[in-house]
């Protein structure tokens, strides 16, 4: 009986490891080719949507946010938050949840802004 449990455990671990290695392909089928991730400040003074497949990545967002804070000194203390959660059921993304810089931002629920974009949103 113990031998059977070990085999099952090895198979499960193998599936999780392989799926994390192939997560990019799995995500294309489960979420589509052009995934977007939305970030904003706590009161939606600044918003940015990344689309890594199109070159709108974290680096571009950080440059835009830095420029926003330099041109609007009253917002120097603002922090960006991600508006999307990690989904532990999507085990094929576990490695990404731990290592990808897009999850380094603290989670905050999305705030609806008046015009659909933040006051100074991009």
Image (spheres, rainbow, N blue to C red):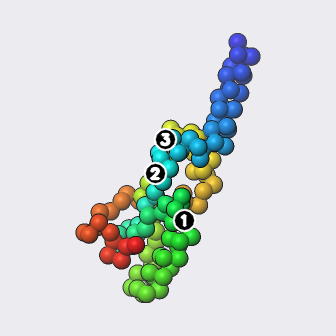
Q: Is residue 6 or residue 15 the one in the foreground?
A: 15
Label 3, on which residue?
A: 30
Q: Is residue 1 above or below residue 71?
A: above
Callout 3: 10 Å neighbours few (<14), some, many (20+)?
few
Label 1, on which residue?
A: 55
Q: Secondary structure at mark 3?
A: helix
Which numbered marker is on residue 94?
A: none
Label 2, on which residue?
A: 85
Q: Earlier in the sequence, mark 1 or mark 3?
A: 3
Point out residue 47 in the picture as x, y percentages from the top left corner.
40, 69
Point out residue 113 in the picture as x, y percentages from the top left corner.
29, 67
User: Is residue 69 visible to us here?
Assistant: yes
Q: Quadrant of residue 118?
A: bottom left
Residue farthest toward the left in the current orientation of the protein: 114
Point out residue 53 in the picture as x, y percentages from the top left corner.
54, 58
User: Could you tell me which residue is drawn at 48 percent across and 82 percent down?
Assistant: 67
Q: Is residue 81 above or below residue 74?
A: above
Point out residue 13 in the picture as x, y percentages from the top left corner.
67, 32
Q: Secondary structure at mark 1?
A: loop
Q: Quadrant of residue 57?
A: bottom right
């Amino acid at each position: 009986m113990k031998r059977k449990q070990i085999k099952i455990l090895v198979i499960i671990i193998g599936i999780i490891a392989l799926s994390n290695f192939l997560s990019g392909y799995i995500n294309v089928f489960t979420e589509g080719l052009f995934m977007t991730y939305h970030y904003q400040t706590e009161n939606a003074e600044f918003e940015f949507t990344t689309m890594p497949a199109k070159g709108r990545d974290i680096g571009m967002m950080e440059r835009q946010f830095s420029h926003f804070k330099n041109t609007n000194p009253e917002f120097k203390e603002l922090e960006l938050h991600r508006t999307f959660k990690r989904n532990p059921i999507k085990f094929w993304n576990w490695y990404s949840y731990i290592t990808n810089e897009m999850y380094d931002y603290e989670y905050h629920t999305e705030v609806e802004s008046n015009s659909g974009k933040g006051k100074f949103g991009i």
